[in-house]
Image (cartoon, grey):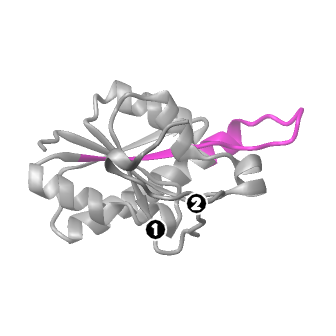
Amino acid sequence: MKFDKILVPLDGSSLAEAALPKAVELAGSSGARLLLLRAAEAHTLPGVDPTEAQIKAVREAEEYLTQVAERLGASGLRNVERAVWYGPAPYAVVEAARLHKVDLIVMTTHGRSGLGRLILGSVAESVLRGTTTPILVVRAAEAPVELPAGKGEAVSGPEVKRG
């Protein structure tokens, strides 16, 4: 498959960066540009002017993406763009994919389930629901694996009986 632009959302964690090797591989084989994205949000107390915190969050996100791009450049990858979006990560990914006309989103999942997923949500699932851009979800080695609930049995062919 030929890609022109691949979006890689990063949150500063090594888990999110686990998507980079696959994105770099795909970019290398198709000549695509990589767009590294970081969503930035500042959380302040009610009644406190959030401006300084917002500026700091964006500055830190820009510095982080610059470091990642430099690491990729040192390994020979030159077609790297960076973008920082202020706001929630799922919205940033969906809007960046749309506005930058990306062909593929490559991201990892934290693999949260249960209460953690309920409280923190799933960025990957929210992005999946919010875009028509193809998504490659990479499971990082440290992401927990949890089998689906319930028990099933594999059947195939004409033996399948419907009741």
Where is residue 142 drawn, in percent x and y? 53, 74
**Mark 2 residue type:** Gly
Q: Nearer the viewer, residue 112 or 33?
A: 112
Quarter of the image for residue 87 reads top right
Count of number-bearing discs:
2
> Which residue, as the protein is rendered here, is positioned at the far right?
47
Which residue has dot 2 on it? 111
The residue located at (75%, 47%) in the rendering is: 118
**Does the residue at mark 2 contact the one at mark 1 (Cβ under 8 Å)?**
yes
- Which element carries disc 1, helix, strand or loop? loop
The residue located at (56%, 37%) in the rendering is: 126
Q: Residues within 10 Å of mark 2 (few under 14, many from 20)?
A: some
Where is residue 132 drawn, in percent x and y? 37, 28
Residue 45 part of the magenta segment: yes
Which residue has dot 1 on it? 140
Q: Nearer the viewer, residue 113 or 16?
A: 113
Residue 46 part of the magenta segment: yes
> Which residue, as the protein is rendered here, is positioned at the far bottom?
142
Q: Residues within 10 Å of mark 1 (few under 14, many from 20)?
A: some
Left or right of residue 99, residue 47 in this image = right
Quarter of the image for residue 73 reads bottom left
Where is residue 31 drawn, in percent x and y? 10, 49
Question: Is residue 136 shown above or below 148?
Answer: above
Q: Quadrant of the N terminus?
A: top left
Where is residue 123 drawn, in percent x and y? 57, 45
The residue located at (45%, 32%) in the rendering is: 94
Q: Nearer the viewer, residue 97 or 127?
A: 127
Read off the magenta span. 34-56
- Which element carries disc 2, helix, strand or loop? loop
